[in-house]
Image (spheres, rainbow, N blue to C red):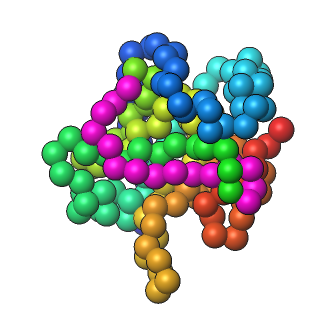
Amino acid sequence: MAAARALSLTAEAVRAVIPGRRGRLPAVFPRLLARWETTSSIPEAGEGQIHLTDSCVQRLLEITEGSEFLRLQVEGGGCSGFQYKFSLDTVINPDDRVFEQGGARVVVDSDSLAFVKGAQVDFSQELIRSSFQVLNNPQAQQGCSCGSSFSVKI
């Protein structure tokens, strides 16, 4: 199976804060984000990208209509400190990054991207559930057994 490849398009370079978003994140979030921004070196190919698996692309093409896309956000919570939140959306905000492959789009806001850059978005079907999941997140130190929450590398 060929490795999933993502193309990114940068929305306007505006670091707008959307009301209500930061209220759900722990107080440590701005300090962690600042640390990652100041310690990052020259980006390598694929760094800061979200990669989509073939099953993710296929499922998104099945469930989205028109301008819909999958939004991936990171919020404070879960059993490990941070949790992934997936939703269908149609509005691209100024601080969003768009990752597209084969007509399927995943959008991540700039704050959440710091916590998932380099990760892979997959769609998994099991007997007990079907869901989008974040796999191989290089920013995560550990995660819970269900894969919906994680703690960050410090």
Q: Could you say which quadrant of the image residue 153 lies in? A: top right
Taking the view exactly as shown, the residue that stands out farthest to the bottom is 127
In the picture, the quarter occupied by the C terminus is top right
> Can residue 7 be seen at all in this image of the molecule?
yes
User: Going 57% across and 51% down the picture, which residue do you hit?
Assistant: 84
- Return the x and y of residue 23 as percentages of the image width and height: 62, 32
- Return the x and y of residue 4 as percentages of the image width and height: 43, 53
- Return the x and y of residue 111 as percentages of the image width and height: 58, 30
> Can residue 138 be seen at all in this image of the molecule?
no
Taking the view exactly as shown, the residue that stands out farthest to the right is 154
Nearer to us in this view, 129 or 97: 129
Q: Which residues are magenta?
A: 79-93
Would residue 82 be counted in the magenta stretch? yes
Nearer to us in this view, 18 or 68: 18
Question: Position of 58 compared to 150: left or right?
Answer: left
User: Going 49% across and 32% down the picture, which residue do you hit?
Assistant: 109
Nearer to us in this view, 148 or 8: 148
- Return the x and y of residue 107 as percentages of the image width and height: 41, 39
Nearer to us in this view, 40 or 2: 40
User: Going 73% across and 60% down the picture, which residue do you hit?
Assistant: 79
User: Going 40% across and 20% down the picture, which residue do you hit?
Assistant: 94
What count of labels does the image hold?
Answer: 0
In the picture, the quarter occupied by the N terminus is bottom left
Would residue 29 be counted in the magenta stretch? no
Question: Position of 67 compared to 95: left or right?
Answer: left
